[in-house]
Image: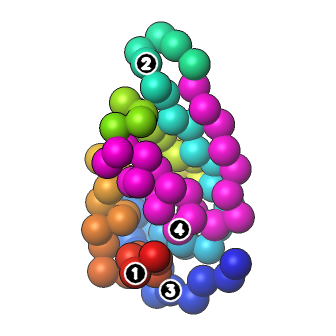
Amino acid sequence: MFIRARPTVNRQGTAFDYNSPAELYLSRRIGRHTDYRRFATAAEAIHYAVLELRTRRSLSAWMQVGDERFNEDEINRLYDDDDYPLRSL
């Protein structure tokens, strides 16, 4: 799925591309199994992570997009951003 969105500025002052491929890591218990998923777009990874965290199936998450790593708070910030393209899903 290709999503057209205006890029959001990330913490390093460069544009965040919601269309970039992303890897998502979800931890269910501290020190236990970590689920790994690859997504065609960061927007899809963010959507999945937020749903998982809100339903409390996972305790923590982080996402890798290119050379950058985003923690739970940063994933939620990207989700809440006006530029996030999948809010209506």
In the image, residue 5 above or below residue 32: below
Q: Nearer the viewer, mark 1 or mark 3?
A: 1
Q: State which tag comes first along the sequence, 4 or 3.
A: 3
Contact between marks 4 and 3 (CB within 8 A): the answer is: yes
Query: Viewed as shown, does residue 33 lie left or right of 61?
Result: right
The residue shown at (34%, 38%) is: 56
Q: What is the C-alpha distance between the residues marked 4 and 3?
A: 10 Å
**57 or 49: nearer the eye?**
57
**70 or 89: nearer the eye?**
89
Q: Nearer the viewer, mark 2 or mark 3?
A: 2
Q: State which tag comes first along the sequence, 1 or 3.
A: 3
The question of residue 52 being in magenta is answered with: yes
Q: What is the C-alpha distance between the residues marked 2 and 3?
A: 34 Å
Q: State which tag comes first along the sequence, 2 or 3.
A: 3
Q: Which residue is mark 1?
A: 88
Q: Nearer the viewer, mark 4 or mark 1?
A: 1
**Range of residues picked out in magenta:** 34-55
The residue shown at (42%, 34%) is: 58
What amino acid is found at the position of numbered circle 3 in the picture? Ala
Q: Residue furthest top?
A: 31
